[in-house]
Image (spheres, rainbow, N blue to C red):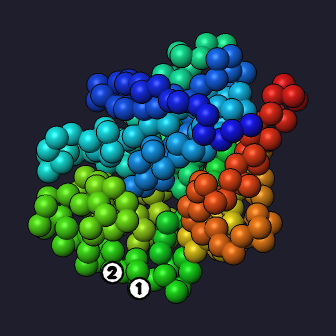
Amino acid sequence: MSDSAEVPTDVQFTSRDGVRLAGSLFAPPRPGAALLISSGVGYPRAFYARFAAYGAARGFACLTYDYRGLGDSAPADMRACAADLLDWGCKDAPAALDCLAARCPGLPLFTLGHSFGGQLVGLMDNAQMARGHALVAVGNGFVLLHDPADWWKEFLFFHVLGPLSIARHGYLKGTRYWPGVSMPRRVFWQWRRWCHRPGYYLRDVRDRLQGGHFVMHGAPMRHFAFTDDPVANRRSEGFTRACYQDADYHTCWIAPEDLGTAHIGHSGAFSQQLKAFWPKPFDWFERLMGEG
């Protein structure tokens, strides 16, 4: 089956606090299930388009979306955007799941989160709507747990290029100062603060969200992690497991040679070159439906 046959439908929906958000729905004529795909920090929804199209070819209605202040959900004046990462998890992601459920009534729902997109499951007050949650490359953002070979890159980004961009433009300007898309300044400062704390976002979750929604009541969670990922590695992945400690949580470690490649890294799993990975989460979703 083709991984690019499905043409998405552009959708708009409203966040929990009234912000208009942009999404793309990849859906076959008669889907058997629905999947919400949540992005990593700085990745626009288009980054996951081929993966979502593959999911549609497998019979899943797949919704990708841009968080507020990102991609097609960004305001005309980025300087005035006050969005932060907790808004993405508490207000945007739950609204996206509600949107998907409304468009696919009666279908089994699943989520798949890449990097921060997997961390935000614990921020969603409606995550229990999903039958299972797939995580892809999700670990502790604390920089000292990452590959030491990348520390200089993270220092340069967080302490030089990012602040320079904000001083000059009023926001983090994408592609020129870093490879991702443009982001609001509050997202950058909050992300930097989290990445310099061993507990990453847990202090803010406790103080601002009264602990979040990390109690999963045994919900199935499958984490697909990669042995050459400098961020979500074997030192940082345990943080994710601890956050979702009462979930039915299992980690599947995948080496580049398992996919017939020399490198996967933190985001390579969604590239066309690594589409050998794409069946794995959908195979798991289908097994869950078979058990249901």
Q: Residue 128 location, x and y as percent?
A: 63, 29
The crowd level at tag 2 (other Cα within 10 Å; few <14, some 14-19, many 20+) is few
Residue depicted at x 33% and y 80%: 156
Q: Is residue 70 visible?
A: yes
Taking the image as shown, residue 259 lies to the left or right of residue 63, namely right
Taking the image as shown, residue 8 lies to the left or right of residue 283, namely left
**Quadrant in which the C terminus appears:** top right
Residue depicted at x 47% and y 25%: 9
Q: Is residue 193 above or below residue 3?
A: below
SS assignment at label 1: helix
Which dot marks residue 152? 1
Which dot marks residue 37? none
Q: Which residue is mark 2?
A: 156
Q: Residue furthest right?
A: 291
Amino acid of disc 1: Trp
Q: Residue 207 location, x and y as percent?
A: 39, 49
Q: Is residue 247 visible?
A: no
Q: Residue 164 location, x and y as percent?
A: 18, 72
Q: Quadrant of residue 134?
A: top right
